[in-house]
Amino acid sequence: MGSTAATDALDAITTSVAALYRVVDSRRPSEESCSDPLRQLADDCLDGLAELARMDARSAALKVRLTDTFVEATRAMASPAVSPHEQSEADMGLVAELACVLTVSERAAGAFLQETRQLTTALPLTLAALQAGTISWQHARIMVEETTDVPPAAAAALEAHFLDPDAVNAARGCPVGDLVPSRFRAKARSWRERHHPVSIEQRHRTSVQDRRLEFAPDRDGMAWLSAYLPADAAASIWNRATDAARALQNPSEPRNLSQLRADTAATWLLAGVAEGVPSPKAQVLVTVPVLSLLGATEETAVLDGYGPIPPSMARRLVADGATSFHRVLTDPRVGAPLEIGRASYRIPAAMRQWLRLRDGKCPFPGCNNQSLDTEADHVLAWHDGGATGISNLGQPCRKHHRLKHTTGWTPIGASRDAPPGWVAPSGRRYASERYDWEPPWMPYPITGPPGMAHPADGPDYLTDADLHQGTHHATGADLPVNLLPVDPLPEWETWIAA
C-alpha cells in the first residue's frame, strides 16, 4: 500500500470518529424534534457502536496493509542474504522492530507477521471483507487459522464458502460477520473437516495416538484436569455428567450445575462406583449420511455438540447398538436430515429430537449452550394461538428462555429447517445461525475413476437432477436401476420426522 492510500485511509477513520462524537454529543433527551428522545438517543448510540465495530475492522485491515508494505520495503533496502543464517538474523531484526512499534512481545509480532502474510497472499476475500468492515479481526484470524496447513485450493474453497455469496453451496444463514467469533470458528472447523484433502479417517488415526490426561496446578489451591480423547468418548462423558448433575439439583442443593458436574465426575473417577450419584445414559445425536453408514463413501458424520467425526466412529456407534446415541440419517441426494431412530417414535419425543437436530444448540445469537441444555418452547405462545409444531418451536437455553419471557426479546421466523431469529427491544433483528447441510459425494461415477470431488466439481459425478431424471447430465446415459446398495437397516424408511 502506498503512502497516499494509507493517509487517505487514516483520514477516513479520523473523520468517522469525529462524526460519531458529534452525533453522541448533540443527542440529548431534551430534543424537541423527536417524539421519543431517549429512544432516539439509544438508537444513535447503537448505530455509533456498530460503526465503531466496522472502523475497528477497517483499522485492522490498514494495520495488515501497512505491515505488509513495511516488510516489503525493509527487505528491498537490505542487502541480499548469502546464507540461511543471515536471512534468519534479518527476519529477527524485522520482527523486533515490529514488536517495538506495536508494543507487543516479539512472539506476538511474529505471529501477526504470519497472519499478515496469509491474508495478503492467500486470503483476498477475507482481507477485502475486513477492509469493508463486514467481518472483525477475530473472524479474519479464525479464517487464517482454519486455512493453515491445507493446500491453497482447499483454503480458497473454505474462504469462498463463507465469504462469496455466489459460491457453489455458499454458507446458509446469517453472514459470517453477524456470527460471534466462537460460532464462526465452529462452522469453519466443521467445513474444514468435511473438505480437508486428507480424509478424516486418516487424520483421526494419527491424532488418537496423542490421547492423554493432563494436570495443571492453578491458584488458590485449585488445579485443572483435562483429557484429550476421541470425540465420541468425550461427548458421552460430558453429557452423562451433565444429566447426572441435573438429577442432583433440587431446592435444598446449594451447588450450581457446573459445580455438580465437576463433583460428579470426580466421584466417578475416585470411587470407581459413584455412591449416591445417579448414572444416567447420555443421549447423543449422531447424524450419518446414508451412504457413509453403508460404507459406500467416507463422508464425515456429525456428533451433536462436537461436530464432524470419522465415519468409522459413527458406524461403530450405530453397529454396537449404543443406547446413548440416536442415529440420524441424511438424504443421499441433498444432505438434509431424514429421520431419527425408531426408539423415539412418540411424537413429543420426536419433535424434541428434531429441534435438537435442526438447531444444534440454543438459537440465540452467539450462544454456545448445547442441545441437552435447552428447553422446547413455543415461538408464538400457546395462549396467543401458537400451534405445537416444528415451525413454531424453538429450544432456547434456560437463560435465553428466561430472557424471552422477562424482557422484550422476541424469537421470530422459525421453520421446519431453520431455527428462529430474534428481535431485540430496540427493534433490531438478528438472524439465526443455520447448519450447512451439503449434498453428499456420490461414489458412482459414470466415467473415469472415483475420487473425492464434490458432485458439482466435474462431469463424472451425479447431480441431484441426474437422480431425479434417471440420466447422467454430461453423457445422457441411463442410470442403473439399482444405483444404491441395499440398506442393511431398512426400517429407517418407515418413519419420517416431518
Image (spheres, grey):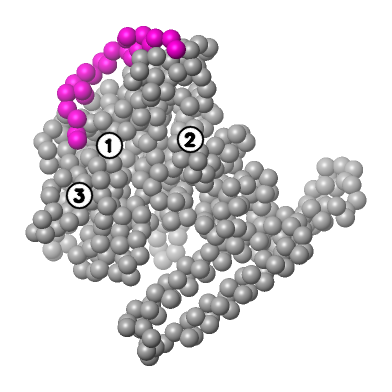
Residue annotated with mark 1: 285
The secondary element bearing badge 2 is classed as loop
Q: Looking at this view, is 53 or 82 the one in front?
A: 53
First in residue order: circle 3 vs circle 2? 2
Mark nearest the camera among 1 and 3 is 3
Residue annotated with mark 3: 393
Q: Looking at this view, is 107 or 196 the one in front?
A: 196
What amino acid is found at the position of numbered circle 3 in the picture?
Leu
Label 3 crowd (10 A; few <14 / some 14-19 / many >=20): many
**Residue 237 seen anywhere in this rendered image of the structure:** no
The secondary element bearing badge 3 is classed as strand
Q: Looking at this view, is 213 or 378 the one in front?
A: 378
Magenta region: which residues?
476-498
Q: State the residue lying farthest toward the front.
A: 33
Residue annotated with mark 2: 168
Q: Give residue 405's quadrant in the image.
A: bottom left
